[in-house]
């Protein structure tokens, strides 16, 4: 039933101004809309990301959103690090770490957090 429709991602934040700066300046996303003082909408590829104000921001302990970047994981991680992104390091079965990038077989992944602690990642695919 829903397989023919686009999906969006919703990210809860405490401070919309700080989040807007991070998602636009650090991640390079284009703001395409805003709904009052509660929601900012960004475009990423063909996807939309709704960043909204919530008292529950940062309470998710799992990955909230990922970007599939192919063979550019290391390059993009380095660029994000240069812009101040802080990467997370996890001990996971089957993965070894090379700097901030976790590698396992053909998969490469790097996790980082937004200013509210939402876990984001870039992955090879």
Image (cartoon, rainbow, N blue to C red):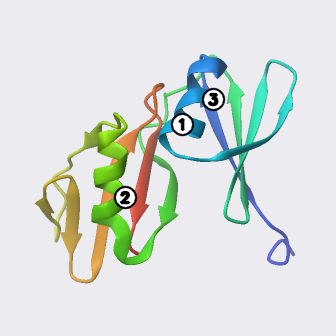
Q: Which mark is residue 54?
A: none
Distance (Cα) linking label 2 and label 3: 20 Å
Secondary structure under the numbered disc 3 in the rendered image: helix
Image point (54%, 36%), residue name = 25
Task: Please indicate whether residue 87 sits to the left or right of residue 83 in the image.
Answer: left
x and y percentages locating residue 98 in the rendered image:
12, 61
Distance (Cα) linking label 2 and label 1: 14 Å
Q: Earlier in the sequence, mark 2 or mark 3?
A: 3
Task: Please indicate whether residue 25 sits to the left or right of residue 70 in the image.
Answer: right
Quadrant for the N terminus, please: bottom right
Image point (29%, 70%), residue name = 108
x and y percentages locating residue 67 in the rendered image:
51, 61
Task: Please indicate whether residue 120 sits to the left or right of residue 43 in the image.
Answer: left
x and y percentages locating residue 53 in the rendered image:
69, 22
Distance (Cα) linking label 1 and label 3: 8 Å
Q: Earlier in the sequence, mark 2 or mark 1?
A: 1
Image point (17%, 67%), residue name = 95
Secondary structure under the numbered disc 1 in the rendered image: helix
Q: In the rendered image, which residue does mark 2 sit on?
A: 76
Image point (56%, 47%), residue name = 28
Residue 44: name its quadrant. Answer: bottom right
Count of number-bearing discs: 3
Q: In the rendered image, which residue does mark 1 sit on?
A: 25
């Amino acid at each position: 039933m829903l397989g023919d429709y686009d999906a969006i991602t919703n990210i809860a934040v405490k401070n919309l101004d700080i989040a807007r700066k991070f998602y636009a300046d650090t991640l390079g996303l284009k703001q395409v809309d805003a709904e009052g003082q509660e929601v900012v909408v960004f475009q990423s590829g063909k996807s939309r990301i709704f960043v909204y104000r919530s008292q529950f921001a940062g309470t998710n302990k799992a990955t909230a959103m990922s970007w599939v970047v192919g063979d550019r994981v290391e390059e993009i991680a380095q660029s994000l690090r240069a812009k101040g992104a802080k990467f997370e390091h996890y001990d996971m079965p089957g993965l070894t770490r090379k700097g901030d990038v976790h590698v396992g077989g053909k998969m490469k992944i790097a996790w980082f957090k937004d200013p509210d602690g939402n876990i984001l990642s870039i992955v090879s695919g």
